[in-house]
Structure formats: structure tokens, C-alpha cells
Image: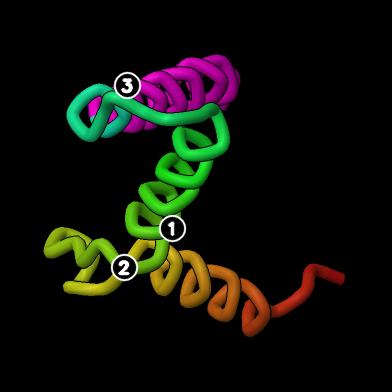
Amino acid sequence: NRQSNRQKPEITKQAHQSTVLRSLQVIHRRGPWRSFDAVEYATLEWGDWFNNRRILEPIGNITPAEAEQQFYAAMDHLPMAE
């Protein structure tokens, strides 16, 4: 179990780096930009698509947001330890 606890920060770091890299690719592809606000808005749009509208086959053809909702809903129904 100690091993898995050490790996979690690295996995989170890798996921964050992947997300940043993909958003930078979107920014580069859609530029040049007129202002910082335009870049910020485009990044927020991409984040919304990535989390709320992107359908993933490996998790049952649902969005990451739906998968997260299902995960926490299932956690609510687990019996509590006494």
C-alpha cells in the first residue's frame, strides 16, 4: 500500500502535465490571439469540452464528468464500517 501512495502524486503530476500540454497545443493552433482574455477564455472552453463533453469509450461512452458522478454516487451506497 505504501508503494501505491508514493505513485499517486506522480500520476497526478503526469495528468496535470498532459492537460497543460494539450491546452497549450490548442492555444498554439488557434492563435494568434488578440488579448490575454481571449487566451483565457479559449482555455476555459477547452477545459469544459475536455471534462464535460468529450465521450470516452474506455469508460463506457460517457464523459469524464459523468464517470466522476457515478463514482461518487456509488461511494454513497457503500456500507459504513462500525
- Tell me whether circle 1 and circle 2 mark residues in contact (CB < 8 Å): yes
Q: Amino acid at mark 1?
A: Asp
Task: Locate residue 5: give its quadrant.
Answer: top right
The x, y position of residue 8, in whole percent, is 52, 25
Q: Which residue is mark 1?
A: 48
Distance in Å between CA atoms under marks 3 and 1: 16 Å
Which is more N-terminal, label 1 or label 3? Answer: 3
Task: Locate residue 61: give its quadrant.
Answer: bottom left
Query: Quick one: SS at disc 2?
Result: helix
Does the magenta segment cover residue 49? no
Q: Quadrant of the C terminus?
A: bottom right
Q: Which residue is mark 3?
A: 21
Is residue 81 shown above or below 44? Answer: below
Out of 56 and 76, give the one closest to the viewer: 56
Q: Which numbered circle lies on residue 53? A: 2
Q: Amino acid at mark 2?
A: Arg
Tell me the magenta residue range. 1-25
Which secondary structure is most common in the magenta stretch? helix
Residue placed farthest to the left in the image?
Answer: 57
